[in-house]
Image: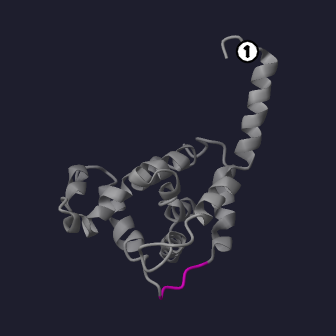
Amino acid sequence: MEYGTQADCDLVNAHFDAHAANYADQVLAWLQQLDGDSPYQVSRLEHCLQTATRAENDGADDETIVCALLHDIGDILAPTNHSQAAAAVLAPYVSEKNLWIVQHHGLFQGYYYFHFMDEDRNARDKYRDHRWYQACADFCANWDQPSFDPDFESRPLTHFEPLVRALFARPPGAFF
């Protein structure tokens, strides 16, 4: 880049703009990769659809519903730190609160199973005094944790697609 020209920079920017314009398509494709074999009673995609449906049923705003839908998208990109990967995808487009919830939901969800892995189920309590602790605990208790139910009727991905497209059509940082 040190020896690049304005024309080179313009070419890179045009490429970036084209990619950014199709980012929702990319994210939806990643989400669809969560469909298929799963150690759970439902696919990872179905889990995400259930989580988003529960959020919508509870009257959550559109941004929060998309965060519920995409909270586990990191499983495709970085399974060992999926919460942080999902947060990185969402970071330029969502509020600080929703970003924090997505980024920390994996640790908070551990409350329900860490003890089966000889880990501290209360590890999330290191954030006990954080202003969004309870919001993240509620996200997991009300939406994430119960969304492994093979009998739950979730809305299809096509229902949520307009919300995903609207979120990623926002200029990054526009919500602040």
Magenta segment: 151-155
Q: Is residue 34 left or right of 133 when viewed as pictured? A: right
Splitting the image into 4 quarters, where does residue 108 fall? bottom left
Splitting the image into 4 quarters, where does residue 45 fall? bottom right
Return the x and y of residue 60 as percentages of the image width and height. Answer: 50, 68
SS of the residue at dot 1?
loop
The answer, for residue 174, to whether it is visible in the render is yes
Query: Any magenta on residue 154?
Result: yes
Splitting the image into 4 quarters, where does residue 113 fall? bottom left
Query: Any magenta on residue 39?
Result: no
Q: Is residue 121 left or right of 143 when viewed as pictured? A: left
Name the foreground residue: 170 vs 5: 5
Name the foreground residue: 62 vs 88: 88
Residue 162 to residue 175: above or below? below
Residue 51 to residue 137: above or below? below
Return the x and y of residue 119 as percentages of the image width and height. Answer: 19, 59
Query: Can you say which quadrant of the picture contains the C terminus?
Result: top right
> Which residue position is annotated with label 1?
4
Pointer 1: residues within 10 angstroms few (<14), some, or many (20+)? few
